[in-house]
């Protein structure tokens, strides 16, 4: 019986990892040196992304194929980058990571960019980071802040009262994943209303 369960688990795992998406995500890497470059759509083509690395102290590198050679690109020195039509901004404060731009209304909302990078490079939308993975900022040049700080910093902003109430409810959820799911739903609802 034990062997049968292990066999079923092994076959299920193989099936999950062998699935292939029909949609090919672009791996063409374009860099924005400054916010002005982003605003004016002045990107610089670097090559095709092949890998990435990061460290807990904020050392972020994207590996790109440039002139048939793999080169490590220190992305911390740029404002941001894009892959196809997906835009990333580099968070200059803690945590120093690329953040994917989810959308904007009165605030700009972001998610940990390593989720998406993992998806396009390995098919896995997970991240080994276990901290708060959702963020916001006032605009594209202001400080990026964890989403759970929104109620504290924006408590007097009546136009954000609905998302603030939603996030406050999410804070009561137990566990990182439950809070993440709740916060993400709050952002999604706010951006799509």
Image (cartoon, helix red, strand yellow):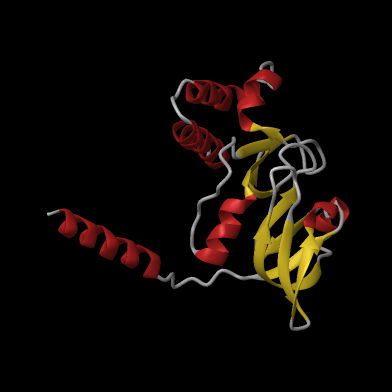
In front here: 84 or 93? 93
Residue projecting furthest to the top: 156
Residue 167 is at least partly visible in this image: yes
Tell me what residue is drawn at x 65 percent, y 25 percent.
149
Q: Is the residue 61 above or below the residue 69 in the image?
A: above
Residue 50 image point, x, y percent: 65, 70
Residue 5 image point, x, y percent: 19, 55
Residue projecting furthest to the bottom: 68
Tell me what residue is drawn at x 51 percent, y 51 percent.
126
How many numbered circles does the render carry?
Answer: 0
Q: Is the residue 133 above or below the residue 21 in the image?
A: above
Q: Is the residue 58 above or below the residue 88 in the image?
A: above
Residue 99 image point, x, y percent: 67, 48
Residue projecting furthest to the left: 1
Q: Is the residue 134 above or below the residue 168 in the image?
A: below
In front here: 91 or 169? 91
Tell me what residue is drawn at x 32 percent, y 67 percent.
15
Residue 95's image quarter? top right
Quarter of the picture containing the N terminus is bottom left
Residue 191's image quarter? top right
Residue 107 is at least partly visible in this image: no
Residue 171 image point, x, y percent: 51, 23
Tell me what residue is drawn at x 52 percent, y 72 percent.
24
């Amino acid at each position: 019986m034990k062997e049968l369960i292990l066999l079923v688990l092994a076959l299920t795992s193989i099936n999950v990892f062998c699935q292939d998406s029909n949609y090919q995500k672009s791996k063409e890497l374009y860099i924005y040196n400054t916010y002005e470059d982003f605003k004016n759509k002045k990107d610089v083509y670097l090559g095709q992304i092949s890998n990435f690395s990061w460290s807990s102290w904020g050392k972020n590198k994207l590996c790109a194929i440039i002139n048939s050679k793999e080169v490590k690109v220190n992305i911390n020195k740029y404002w941001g980058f894009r892959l196809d039509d997906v835009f990333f901004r580099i968070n200059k404060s803690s945590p120093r990571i690329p953040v994917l731009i989810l959308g904007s209304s009165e605030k700009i909302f972001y998610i940990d960019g390593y989720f998406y990078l993992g998806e396009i490079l390995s098919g896995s939308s997970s991240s080994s980071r276990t901290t708060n993975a959702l963020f916001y900022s006032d605009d594209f040049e202001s400080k990026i802040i964890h989403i759970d700080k929104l109620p504290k910093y924006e408590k007097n902003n009546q136009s954000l009262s609905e998302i603030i109430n939603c996030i406050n409810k999410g804070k009561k959820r137990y566990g990182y994943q439950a809070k993440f799911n709740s916060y993400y739903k709050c952002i999604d609802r706010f951006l799509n209303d």
